[in-house]
Every structure is written in C-alpha cells, then in structure tokens.
Image (cartoon, rainbow, N blue to C red):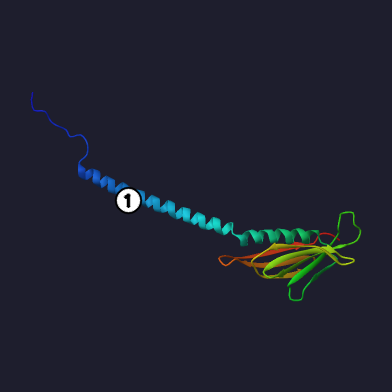
Amino acid sequence: MNTKEIRTRKGFTFVELMITTVIFLIVGLAIGVVIVDGQTGWNTMYDRLNSDVVTDGYVARRKFDAVMRSASRSQSLVASDGSWIEVYYYASPSSTVVDRYARFYTADGDLNFEYGQLEPRATLGVETVCENVISCTFKQVGTSAQMTLKLDNGTQTNTVVSSAVTHNQ
C-alpha cells in the first residue's frame, strides 16, 4: 500500500468565484433593468388611463347617451354649425306630453348640460359635464344623435365619439 495520500481539493479557486460573481452581477443588472422598465411603462399607462381627459370623456359620453336615450323622437334641434343640440323629453313616465328640454353646448372650454321646463320656458339647472374641451360638434341623422368631443389638458388629447338613438315617442 502506498502511504502517500492523494489529496483532493475541496472548494473553488478565487478565479472561479470572481467569474461566477461577475456572471451573477450581469444577470442581476439585466433583470433589474427589465423590472424598472416595466414599472415605468406601467406608470405611464396608468397615468394615461386615469388622466382627467379620459375620465371627462367617459362622463360626457355616459351623460350624452343617457339623455339622448330618454329623449322624444318627435322633436329635437341642432345648431347649423353643430355647436349645440337640444332635445325634448317627458318629465315622468306618466306624462302625456313632452314637457321638458335638455341642451348640450360648449362654453369657455366646458361641455355644459342645461335642462328645464318647456312651456313656459324655464331653466331648472345647468351642469358642467366636463372640462378641457377644445371642440365639440353635434349631428342628428334620423332618430339618432352624435357627439364628437375633443379634450386636451395640455399633456394628453382624447377624442370621444358617442351616438345614441332616441327611444321615446
């Protein structure tokens, strides 16, 4: 028997540890860049989706749709330049005559909704539906009405097109 023991080394050399450390550092930095870039993209998209022009556009579309769907088919007026639309509706389901009016128009960068009594003409209220309006046009074709609304808050622009069909006789 050989009395000489064969020594086997256990562990890694310093060079192997340095190479492994550099590889892990490069991979870690790459993963960090991907995470930061993803978070930045998410924040940008979140800001776009929740900006005031998107929210205002949604509110304006919902209000326009609700009013137009409850309006009477028999009567409505649109300005020749499309700057306002006025429709007529029943004050309650039990009303036998059209006795109320609703009007959408823009003024000072706001989309306004005016409503009131038809005969004698009396305004019951005016609401600001949305702000940051740069243009708004209305059209009527048959029993349907269309609103094209452009909003701009200085950092983002949004265009909302809404169409609704009047349902009441």
Residue found at the far right of this picture: 96
Residue found at the far top of this picture: 1
Which image quadrant for residue 143?
A: bottom right
Q: Which residue is mark 1?
A: 26
Q: Quadrant of the C terminus?
A: bottom right
Secondary structure beneath disc 1? helix
Q: Position of residue 24 (x, y in %)?
A: 32, 46
Dot 1: few (<14), some (14–19), or many (≥20) neighbours within 10 Å?
Answer: few
Q: Is residue 150 left or right of residue 103?
A: left
Give whichever of 127, 4 is nearer the camera: 127
Give whichever of 165, 54 is nearer the camera: 54
Q: Position of residue 40 (x, y in %)?
A: 47, 56
Give whichever of 21, 140 is nearer the camera: 21
Q: Residue at x 70, y 66 (%)?
A: 111
Residue found at the far bottom of this picture: 80
Amino acid type shown at disc 1: Ile
Q: Is residue 73 left or right of residue 64?
A: right
Q: Quadrant of the N terminus?
A: top left
In this view, 148 is above or below 16? below
Q: Position of residue 94 (x, y in %)?
A: 90, 54
Give whichever of 68, 153 is nearer the camera: 153
Which image quadrant for residue 153?
A: bottom right
Number of numbered tags placed on the structure image: 1
Q: Position of residue 45 (x, y in %)?
A: 53, 57
Q: Is residue 64 left or right of residue 22?
A: right
In this view, 126 is above or below 36? below
